[in-house]
Image: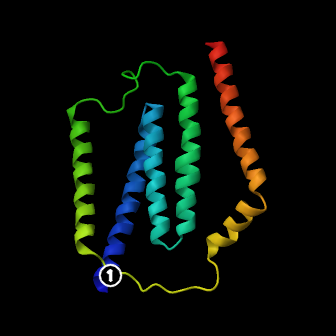
Amino acid sequence: MQSLGLFYQFHFYLFGLIAVASALAFVTRKSPVAAALWLVQTLFSLAALYVMLDAQFIGAIQVFVYAGAIMVVFLFVVMLLNLGHPAEIADMRGKWGRIAAGAVGLALLAQLLVLLRQQLPRAPRVEQEVPGVIHGIADPLFREYLLAFEITSVLLLAAIIGSVILAKRRA
């Protein structure tokens, strides 16, 4: 049981370090596309921290709303601004950036393989008669407010189409 505590403590600090490093990379990038991708990395690290703190719903919302929807809007605005040729706004130039990215990828792959080999003991599943936190939010959203939810999504789609048409007219 002690090793499980060390496992969570190690990963808590690891995701915290990744979040801080990604946030620093976000504010130091010249390319808006690269900055947006570093922000996505920061948001995923924060979601992992929320999940480790037993706030799974907040972690899921972090991924869906911020890393998903908000970043799509950011990248859509960057796309509409037409910032130039992709080679001019590239963030990773030279072989050292690629080597560092490959090293990080190999480290993450090694960590995943170690996790798969360890097969950590799982907590016993407890049947709950009381619905969880997500049920209290999802039930009204998908029953009573489903029409408003869907109308909002159609309005957002219409706004995106309208902004593309307006941007094409000016160009």
Vertical placement of 75 versus 54: above or below?
Answer: above
Measuring from the top left, give residue 62's x and y in whole percent.
Answer: 55, 57
Q: Which residue is mark 1?
A: 121
Estimate how packed mark 1 is, as few (under 14), some (14 to 19) or many (20 or more) residues with alpha carbons within 10 Å.
few
Vertical placement of 4 versus 147: above or below?
Answer: below
Q: Closer to the camera, 28 or 102? A: 102
- Residue 105 in the figure: left or right of residue 90: left
Picture residue at 62% right of the left edge, 86% below the top: 129
Measuring from the top left, give residue 94's x and y in whole percent.
Answer: 24, 30
Q: Quadrant of residue 3?
A: bottom left
Location of the N terminus by quadrant is bottom left
Badge 1 amino acid: Pro
Measuring from the top left, give residue 123's x and y in whole percent.
Answer: 41, 84
- Residue 68 in the figure: left or right of residue 113: right
Q: Quadrant of residue 7?
A: bottom left
Q: Closer to the camera, 49 or 67? A: 67
Measuring from the top left, give residue 156's x and y in whole percent.
Answer: 70, 39
- Residue 99 in the figure: left or right of residue 129: left
Location of the C terminus by quadrant is top right
Picture residue at 46% right of the left edge, 19% below the top: 84
Picture residue at 35% right of the left edge, 73% below the top: 9
Vertical placement of 35 versus 1: above or below?
Answer: above
